[in-house]
């Protein structure tokens, strides 16, 4: 009977030389990343979704491509504090700072929902120095409401 001796050293497939694992990064990882040119837009649209639990803010260009977004939760608020006007103002300040990097000076505001961040978000946009061109309430309203109660039998 022949005994087979297994080679336990790790050989790289291309060179058949032992490869030693090290913590060095690949040469391509040493290259610095190129700075991404920000899209410059003069006017944009701000979509505010004010729910009872959170306030979501999205900044888009006129075509609808998202430039920046923030929410009360992403601003660092947890639990019931997300549903406060102050949390909405903090999220608006985050979005407006990103908007100024994109060169946005005027915005159209579309508000949806019944939450407490509705009015606060408009105040926050005004105080951030953005020119509000239009405010529209796009809250969906049902045509015929919820299903009616069953008819009373006497």
Image (spheres, helix red, strand yellow):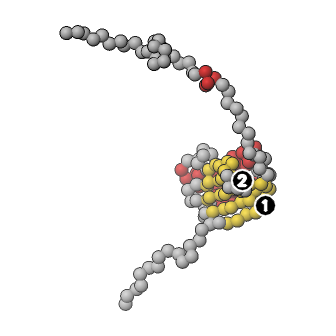
Quadrant housing the N terminus: top left
- 81 or 138: nearer the viewer: 138
Residue 76 horizontal side relative to residue 63, left or right: left
- Residue 109 appears in the picture as rendered: yes
Sequence-earlier tag: 1 or 2: 2
Residue underneath mark 2:
61
Q: How far apart are marks 1 and 2 (CA)?
A: 14 Å
Task: Check the picture and name the quadrant holding the C terminus.
Answer: bottom left
Query: Which residue is nearer to you in this view: 141 or 23?
Result: 23
User: Disc 1 on helix, strand or loop?
Assistant: strand
Residue 30 place in picture, x, y as percent: 63, 23
Q: Quadrant of residue 16?
A: top left
Note whether 54 is above or below 31 in the view shown.
below
Image disc number at residue 133: 1
Neighbour tally class for label 1: few under 14, some 14-19, many 20 plus, Cα within 10 Å: few
Identity of the residue drawn at 59% across and 71% down: 141
- Location of residue 137 with respect to 144 vertically, above or below: above
Q: Is mark 2 on a helix, strand or loop?
A: loop
Left or right placement of residue 128 versus residue 14 in this view: right
Q: How many marks?
A: 2
Q: Where is residue 72 in the image (x, y as percent from the top left)?
A: 61, 50
């Amino acid at each position: 009977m022949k005994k087979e001796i297994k080679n336990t050293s790790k050989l790289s497939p291309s060179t058949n030389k032992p490869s030693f694992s090290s913590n060095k990064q690949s040469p391509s990882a040493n290259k610095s990343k190129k700075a991404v040119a920000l899209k410059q837009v003069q006017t944009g649209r701000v979509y505010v979704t004010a729910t009872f639990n959170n306030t979501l803010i999205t900044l888009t260009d006129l075509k609808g491509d998202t430039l920046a977004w923030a929410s009360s939760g992403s601003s660092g608020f947890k639990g019931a504090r997300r549903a406060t006007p102050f949390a909405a103002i903090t999220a608006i300040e985050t979005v407006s700072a990103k908007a100024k990097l994109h060169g946005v000076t005027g915005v159209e505001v579309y508000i949806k929902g019944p939450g407490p961040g509705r009015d606060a978000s408009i105040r926050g946009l005004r105080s951030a120095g953005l020119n509000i061109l239009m405010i529209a309430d796009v809250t969906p309203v049902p045509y015929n409401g919820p299903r009616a109660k069953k008819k009373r039998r006497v």
